[in-house]
């Protein structure tokens, strides 16, 4: 039975550009404490910090 290949955790958090030699962090950092924020889609799209409890709601464009 073939299992779906999982990407390494670093591949989901960073975007690598081998031609330019740059690494870009894809997640948002908490402006209050500096921790990595989690993105939640349901029930309302938002970014939430599990360390300090700060929540940033996304507005519709």
Image (spheres, rainbow, N blue to C red):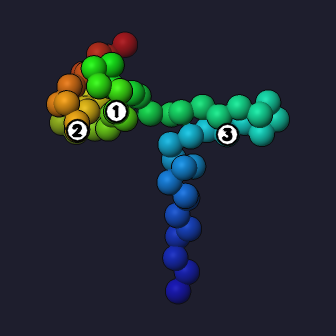
Separation of residues labelled 3 and 2 (CA atoms): 26 Å
Separation of residues labelled 1 and 3 (CA atoms): 21 Å
Q: Is residue 25 visible?
A: yes
Nearer the N terminus, badge 1 or badge 3?
3
- Disc 2 and disc 1 in contact, CB within 8 angstroms: yes
- Disc 1 and disc 3 in contact, CB within 8 angstroms: no
Task: Locate residue 21: give its quadrant.
Answer: top right
Q: Position of residue 41 (x, y in %)?
A: 28, 37
Q: Residue at x 35, y 27 (%)?
A: 34
Separation of residues labelled 2 and 1 (CA atoms): 8 Å
Find numbered disc 2 in the image and state the secondary structure of the residue it sits on.
Answer: loop
Q: Residue at x 65, y 34 (%)?
A: 23
Q: Which residue is mark 1?
A: 35
Residue 50, numbered label: 2
Find numbered disc 3 in the image and state the secondary structure of the residue it sits on.
Answer: strand
Decide: few, some or many residues near mark 2? Use Cα within 10 Å; few <14, some 14-19, many ≥20: few
Query: In the figure, is residue 13 to the left or right of 40?
Result: right
Extreme-right residue of the structure: 19
Q: Position of residue 39 (x, y in %)?
A: 32, 36
Q: Which residue is mark 3?
A: 16
Query: In the figure, is residue 31 to the left or right of 25?
Result: left
Nearer the N terminus, badge 2 or badge 1?
1
Q: Is residue 45 visible?
A: no
Q: Nearer the viewer, residue 29 or 43?
A: 29
């Amino acid at each position: 039975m073939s299992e779906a290949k999982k990407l390494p955790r670093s591949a989901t958090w960073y975007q690598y550009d081998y031609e330019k030699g740059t690494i870009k962090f894809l997640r948002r950092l908490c402006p209050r404490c500096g921790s990595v924020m989690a993105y939640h889609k349901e029930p309302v799209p938002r970014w939430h910090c599990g360390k300090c409890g700060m929540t940033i709601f996304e507005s519709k464009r």
